[in-house]
Amino acid sequence: MMFSFQFSPSFQRAISLCLITSLLSSCAFAPWEKSAVKGKTPEERSASAQKQVTEKPEAAIPRKDLLVTQDQAITELLTEAEKARNSSRLDEASALYERVITLAPNNVRAISGKAGIERKQKQRVRIEEASKLNTNKNSDAALAILRGVLMETPENSEALALQTEIRSQKPLARIEPPKLKPPFQKPVTLEFRDVTVKMMFEALSRATGINFILDKDIKSETKATAFIKNAPIEEAIEMVLATNGLDKKALTETSALIFPNTAQKNKDYKELMIRSFYLTNASAKQVASTLKTVLKSKDVVVDDRLNMIVMRDTPEVIRIAEKLVAANDLADPEVMLEIEVLEISRSRFQELGIAYPNQISINNLVSLDTAILSGTSAATVAKTTTQTSQQLTVDSLNKLTSRSLSVSPNPAFNFRKTTDDVNLISNPRIRVRNNEKAKVLVGDKVPVITTTSTANVGISESVAYLDVGMKLDVQPRITLDDFVNIKIELEVSSLGGATTTKNGATVYTIGTRSASTQLRLKDGETQVLAGLILDDERKNASKLPGLGDLPFLGRLFANQANKKSKTEIVLAITPRILGNISRPNAEISEYWSGTDVQINDRPQISVPMSSGLKLVRELQVAEPATAESVVSQEAVLDPLPIPTPPTSPPVTQDLKAVVPSDPKAPTPIDQATPAQ
């Protein structure tokens, strides 16, 4: 069987028009347009949009499309640049930032990002140089370079890793200021007996090739006796200075200024540095207080806006301040507290029996007839009868009928049993900083109306809201061994029955259970706190007097209701530490700080125990006595022959120079040549 349908030409034209309209509307969202856009680069898409604006400068839609296209192109390029930068592909990131600047020359993110890339590339070259210096056993110079890099970018991971590696290889390494570089580094043996300080430095200058410039306030009559064996030249100079109350300032690699170690001379000669500390985590005021207390530094300024400290002091004090700041500017650890509160409630209710009336009342009812007129001409009259209760009199007792008696309450047969099981679960997760308080409230705010009566004013009401539900207060303290000490305060409250006051206000009874404790948990350990149990059991019986007390039959004349409920609160808490503080390394935890008079980042005399050191300092203001000074360099195998003055005792053949104590006598050291 075949069916055929024929449509009129007008209907066919309508169908064709609908199809054409649908196709045209779908072209507005054609996928090939998106694919064509997708195949273009951000610059090409922006140029295409710019071309449309040029062709139609007064049209709003092309201008809007240009703004959207440029924004999308810039965002796409910046995202790719950030990914390349985080992956250490600096050249690729720099090229992407250049493309953004081409599209938007004033884009702040692109300009700052490109500048950061250039700075990081320069720092990478310096880090490679520091690595080579460390390989060549020049760790001090490597640490100095890394210190400059970290001052620019404290978060540079490559510099931090190399610095940690160098410090682990050399725990006591420190950043030295510019210092003297003697022509040799091998140990020397020095012997001075009753020699003036000026003559001692003259002998040291002849032997080491270092130029010593003495301050005018150094007393010429000050004498010293020193015996130094197998000590490096620099340490020998330091020991001579320390034992004679002197200090030095390196002018060049081969020149030094010697001056008395007094407060005024230190102010005159010791140069000061200015160091700015940009703190990330610590409070600038607290760190500044620490610097003033520990380092006795006076020129410390705090900038609260930038959380920055500006300090002006000697280079040695600045070095110690850097370590103090590094030890204090640490991020506070955080902990994620996973809390689960369960409220388990079970109730059983059973009511069985007959509820009999417990009172009989007499009603004095009087019928009243009322006529109601309706209509305009009062032609229609309706009569209604109502009964009202009046006061009972003796006369009305004679007229009692069955209608005058009523019982209350109405008799009822009760056979009911209900079971309720409720499990309320609250599972909040809260992130807390170390030693900070966190509060969790899961419940409702119940309004409480307070009525106040004031003379000559009247009665006023105020509304306050009371928290009802589960309220939890926690305060964690995270330790370095991944334990969390938690102070917990738990309060669970529920809304009870309502009571109406004389003024008509409604108040509620609120039941509360609370617990407060402190516990110590390991990271990831779960502790369950239970035992907050409320057990309530009630039995109620309503009986007819006498009949309700009969054995067995008494249940027919009674109504019994039994109710039993039990509620338990269970709290489970699990701490998970997020980014705990790691113990600082030895370089930051322990370091030298000088004496109580002068702060320094190294010990006053740092000499190995195997150097055979013996120092004697004697200050004399008497007449000059016969003295002998011997300067020997163990690296010299064949010393030059030195004539011995007649006043001096005979010396051994391995001596390099003999200096008499009389300044007018000829100086034999002039005939000696420094060791090459």
Image (cartoon, grey):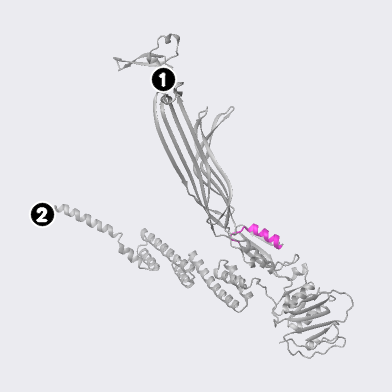
Q: Which residues are magenta?
A: 279-295
Q: Does the magenta run of residues contain 284?
A: yes
* 50 relative to 376, above or below: below
The secondary structure that dominates the magenta segment is: helix
* CA–CA distance in space, label 2 to label 1: 84 Å
Q: Of helix, strand and loop, which one carries label 1?
A: strand
Seen at 38% across and 60% down, the residue is 63
Closest to the observer, 539 or 457: 539
Q: Is residue 587 left or right of residue 415?
A: right
Q: Quadrant of residue 160?
A: bottom right
Residue 180: % across, % down: 70, 78
Residue at far left of view: 1
Quick one: 94 or 604, which is closer to the camera?
Answer: 604
Q: Position of residue 232 (x, y in %)?
A: 72, 79
Residue furthest to the right in view is 623
Q: Amino acid at mark 1?
A: Val
Which tag, 2 or 1, sits closer to the chain's start? 2
Q: Amino acid at mark 2?
A: Met
Q: Which of 113/674 is in front?
A: 674
Which one is in front, 45 or 416?
416
| Picture quadrant where residue 557 is located | top left
Q: Residue at x 40, y 67 (%)?
A: 42
Q: Give how far across and how far down residue 526 sits, in percent.
A: 52, 53
**To which residue does mark 1 refer?**
407
* Left or right of 298 on screen, residue 44: left
In the rendering, at what x and y percent does residue 428 appear?
49, 50
Residue 2, which numbered label?
2
Please check the rendered image and state whether residue 223 is part of the magenta-colored stretch, yes or no: no
